[in-house]
Amino acid sequence: MNSIERIKAALNFKQPDRVPVIAQVFGHAAILAGVALGDYVRNGELLARCQLQALQFYGYDAVFALMDANVETEAAGSILTYRTDQYPIVKSAVLANGTDLNTLLPPNPWQAGRMPELLKAVRILRQEAGDSVLVVGCVLGPMTLATQLLGIEAALYLAIDEPEQFAHLLGFATKIAMRFGVAQIEAGAHLPMVFEPSASPEVIPAPFYREFVLPYLNQVFTTFKQAGSAANWLHTAGPATPILHLYPQARVDLANIDFCVDPLDAMQALPQTCLNGNIKPLAYVEATPEEIAAESSRLLKLFANRGGFILSSGCEIPPESKPENIAAMVTAACQEK
Amino acid sequence: MNDSMMDLLVKALLDGDQTQAIIEVGKLREAGVRRRQIITDGVEAAMTQLDAKCTVEQFNLLEIMLCGRAATGVMKVLYPLGAPPLQTKAAVVMGTLEGDVHDLGKNILKMVLTAKGYRVVDCGKDCSLERLVDAVEQEAPVAAGISGLITTIIPQVRQMKDKMAERGLGHIKVIAGGAALKQATAESLKVDFIAQSAFDGLHYLDQIVGVRHE
Ligand code: B12
């Protein structure tokens, strides 16, 4: 089996030749290649080259065309600060200074900000590796993008004080996500992962999630499926257990679970949904390869009977992680029968 | 003083109803209640109740944000020029370090501490270590608080105590919180305390300044 077949088998609860392993290597690919993170997130070709190099080095099952959490908000007009060795940050959010939402247009993915660079990365990755390895794009989920357009506190207060206005903002964010994701599929991504950290129960309670987030996520995922996405992958960091059972309502096929989610709870909440996770991100920086290997086999055993599992980290593998720790996870998946 | 009037303020604060809370403050002031007492028996009392309600499993962020916003609104009405209440318990300097945009947790901590009578000096997000130490030097706080949600800032955290010691500020406590720092131990981060929540941090600070917990 190649990586794509292996992942598809896991998604469908069929027996893969081995459990797929997806290391959430984003900025770490730059560090590994000796490239500045600040350059990596601005240059699609460089990003793709670093991803391919990391793929060759580790031999896992997926590559990512993913820059950081600010691509969409920048394309819509927010100003970022770039640094050499760190991810960029939002200096001023486009809607934070009183700009009227009604005057904003959803950015054109082929023109605005770094979106075209990301699409370029997708195209190269698909060309170079995409026949056998999963090429994953990324869009922010509606809730997260709303918080990135307005600022997280202002967005949460808006949701409570003026729910209709907030729904309007979510609608706008949804449009951006759909356009950008469809463009990624057109450029060759097998699927755009939906990155939705601000919808974590760490931030909003489950009833809020049901009312404000689910319907919009459903729209996004329905659109992606129609556009040919291989699977609907939802990524929500933090202690997501209280909302997992709602994922099928948003048509989620693959659910990321963070290290603070008990895999047994996740299996119970999502009996028919493939799960990926959930090694602690900090462990790749601080633990030893032996510890990562032990944690990997614990997870592989836990899911052995059920299937529907992809071995992975709970969230992004920190850029400064030790390569031998990432390698230990990949080896664990390859050696397990 | 009319206890039930104060209760109404506490209730409005706990409901997160800023408008109502400000109305109640107006009534209390008309009845001749001192600002200091409104802070102690109203704002701080509401925070204490919220604290008791917020366990690790039962932690409703929005509830705290709304209560925090109402409390901040009340303080602004009581001290319109931004002058802090006269006898603050102590000062606390806090910030999110360079490269980290997550500031929701820090802002909540700020609201909680302010409402509990601390003077908070907020260095904001994406703050350089140098600036944070400068602020510690200027403000003579009881502690410096670092909020960190991404692991890349950990090396900066580890330098904090040494940088402070270089300037003779080694006696000031450093406390840390936030998702990335919570995964580590106090020893490995070279800090004095790691808080699991804003209230956890509050309890630690109260202990240092010698406030007894009811
Ligand atoms: C919302 C969120 C975001 C939002 C943040 C918006 C904002 N302005 O704050 C956005 C979408 C922007 C975002 C971006 C990113 N994020 Co983020 N995000 C989260 C998420 C889901 C919740 C964080 C949050 O706000 N929690 C709610 C607050 C209230 O909780 P809190 O901060 O812990 O604070 C409480 C206590 O800890 C305490 N506290 C906090 N600080 C302090 C300090 C002191 C002194 C004390 C006493 C107490 C205290 O008080 C609060 C109340 O009790 C977490 C998941 C998680 N597990 O936390 C990931 C998480 C923090 N993000 C993560 C990552 C990786 C990122 C990105 C790097 C992704 C990317 N590749 O682009 C970027 C970061 C860019 C940057 N340069 O910083 C990772 C970090 C892991 C790591 N590698 O280090 C996390 C942990 C997810 C994970 N499990 O991996 N994110």
Image (cartoon, helix red, strand yellow):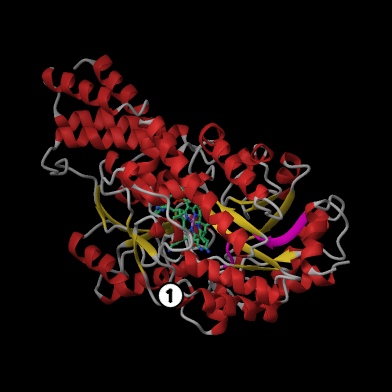
Circle 1 chain: A
- Residue toward you, B63 or A7: A7
Asked where in the image residue B6 lies, by quadrant, the reply is top left
Whether the residue under disc 1 has CB within 8 Å of ligand 1: no
Tag 1: residue type?
Gly
- Is A314 colored magenta in this rendering? yes
- Residue toward you, B134 or A44: A44
Residue B28 vs A183, above or below: the answer is above
- Residue toward you, A114 or A296: A114
Q: Position of residue B127 (x, y in %)?
A: 31, 64
Residue A112 left/right relative to A94 = right
Element class at badge 1:
helix
Residue B154 vs B3, above or below: the answer is below
- Residue toward you, A187 or B173: A187
Q: Residue at x 25, y 72 (%)?
A: B168
Q: Position of residue A17 (x, y in %)?
A: 87, 65
Q: Residue at x 49, y 38 (%)?
A: B59
Residue A166 left/right relative to B89 = right
Q: Position of residue A12 (x, y in %)?
A: 81, 51
Residue ID for mark 1: A38
Residue A60 left/right relative to B57 = right
Asked where in the image residue A315 lies, by quadrant, the reply is bottom right
Image quadrant where one finds the C terminus of chain A: bottom right
Region in magenta: A309-317
Image quadrant where one finds the N terminus of chain A: bottom right
Asked where in the image residue A248 lies, by quadrant, the reply is top right
Q: Residue at x 28, y 46 (%)?
A: A99
The reply to whether residue A261 is visible in this rendering is no
